Image (tube, rainbow, N blue to C red):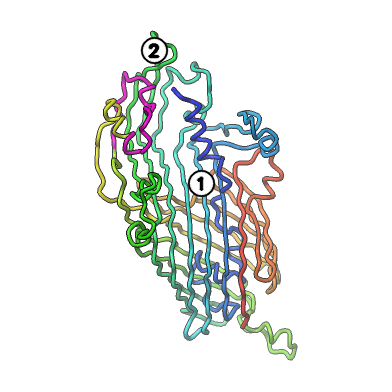
Amino acid sequence: MKINKITLMAMAMMIAGIANAQDFLGYNYSNYQTAGGMIFNPASIAESRYRVNVNLFSTNIGFTNNAYSVNVNSLVSNIDNIKEGRDYSKMHGSGAKNIHINIDMLAPSFMIDFGKKIGSIGFSSRLRSLVSIDGVESQFIDMLGNASHSDYLDQRITMKKLRLNVHTFADAGLTYARTVWETDQHLVKAGVTGKILFGLGGSSVHIDDLAIKIHPNIDDEQDEIFDEFRGKLTAVYSKNIDQLLMGEIDMENFFDEQVSKSVGFDLGVEYEWYQNGRQPAATTDSTVKRKKKFTPYTVKVSAAITDIGSLKYKPAENVGSYAFNGENKSVSDLDAPEGVDAFSDYIDYLKTQGIIADDKDLSTYRMKLPTALRLNVDWNAYKIFYVNAGTILNLTAASSFAAKYPSQIYITPRVEFSFGGVYSPVSAGAGNVNWGIGFNVGGFFIGSSSIISNFVKSNISAMDIHFGFAVPIKK
């Protein structure tokens, strides 16, 4: 059994990427983040503090997992000779292990506020690539990289429900938001975003009820036999990925023939409460007059459901559902012979070996968007000091083909001015607790939701960064 290959593949998925699944955390609910804020709640652009806001670019790159931690100092010093226990370590403990990678790029986008009677409109263009791996059993993680046969032979290894999903897609969205109810102390805003979706590629591997038990071959100690090898495998990936890997993709007709297209939606509402009323007391002070339109709310509560929709793909060959039946087969039978490079060819090879059997073919399949419920409370504690708290709840079913955002909770104190501010988010989710900091000056912002905790920890299991630049035009 080629443990070294298995280890390298798993480690590549779990820690090799530089890319925490939190998206622009800390900055995303700033009152001065409008064009970028509508992707998290479309209602946010109604009665904006800006007449026009143009996002030139924004990027979030994040990686988080609860399977492995990395000693960065040691890893850099020993990059040519990486060893487990010194440069990286398994995160032991019961419960399934999860890995999430998120690359999110907001391209040129804008919003325009036409006033409360007409409302606000916005346009966004966005590219995302998400990887989510859920349900990896601790027992399997402990086995990886273990060179001693006695540690995994004659033990029953199980995987109840493993989900590996990868999805790369883009969208162009049109947002409309306006005030739907207001009094002197209360304000309710609602918004909707309709999106044209462009699917660039999606793949999923689902393993259910896997059970493996390996027994040594008495006649040949270098080989092993499966005493038990059963379960169900569902593997799908889009045809264009297969064509790209084989160098057969038609780039001239790529957009028309290789890109999946569909529509999606975001829905959002916001409620603001003004303890002392929305209109300041009459005064001749020119400073107060200038701020009259932007009396700070006391509390803002927002809710949004984002990324409603899915993309349909044409699958590559030999994708579908298969039943494992490898009892009494040699472990070395899993090794692909020379010349078998494509996934479809490998599936054919396993069929000839009698290790898998067809269960269900798929002519098409759908990758769901990372649908999430976003709940948020923002408290204006004192003048320019705010405390923001909320949660992101994953709404995609475990049975779906869908790369997702992991559920998490967060709290972010911040100080914000019209020209800048500082925020420091603390978040918990996907088996990690992280603390970060970020700054925005003018239209430029940069931050990380994990940088402070990573400086404190000797071993890290999450990292992220977000940055961007916008051009605001005040009212």
Callout 1: SS = strand
Mark closer to the chain start, 2 or 1? 1
* Label 1, residues with CA under 10 Å away: few <14, some 14-19, many ≥20: many
Q: Position of residue 366 (x, y in %)?
A: 33, 53
The disc at residue 112 is none
Q: Inspect the image, locate mark 1, and give the three-letter code of the amino acid beneath it.
A: His
Q: Position of residue 378 (x, y in %)?
A: 60, 65
Quadrant position of residue 64: top right
- Left or right side of 170 for 326: left
Identified at 52% across, 52% down, the residue is 102
Identified at 45% across, 57% down, the residue is 372
The one of 322 and 456 positioned closer to us in this rendering: 322
Q: Inspect the image, locate mark 2, and give the three-letter code of the amino acid beneath it.
A: Asn
Q: Is residue 320 visible?
A: no
Magenta residues, start to end: 322-346
**Eye-nearest disc, 2 or 1:** 2
Callout 2: SS = loop
Vertical relation: 77 (above or below) 327: below
Q: Position of residue 207 (x, y in %)?
A: 37, 37
Residue located farthest toward the bottom when viewing the structure as drawn:
284
Q: Does the magenta segment cover residue 324?
A: yes
Residue located farthest toward the top when viewing the structure as drawn:
219
Vertical relation: 277 (above or below) 401: below
Q: Does the magenta segment cover residue 81?
A: no
The disc at residue 100 is 1
Identified at 64% across, 30% down, the residue is 81
Q: Position of residue 48 (x, y in %)?
A: 57, 77
Query: Which quarter of the image is occupied by the N terminus?
Result: top left
Q: Which residue is mark 2?
A: 217
Q: Is residue 446 visible?
A: yes
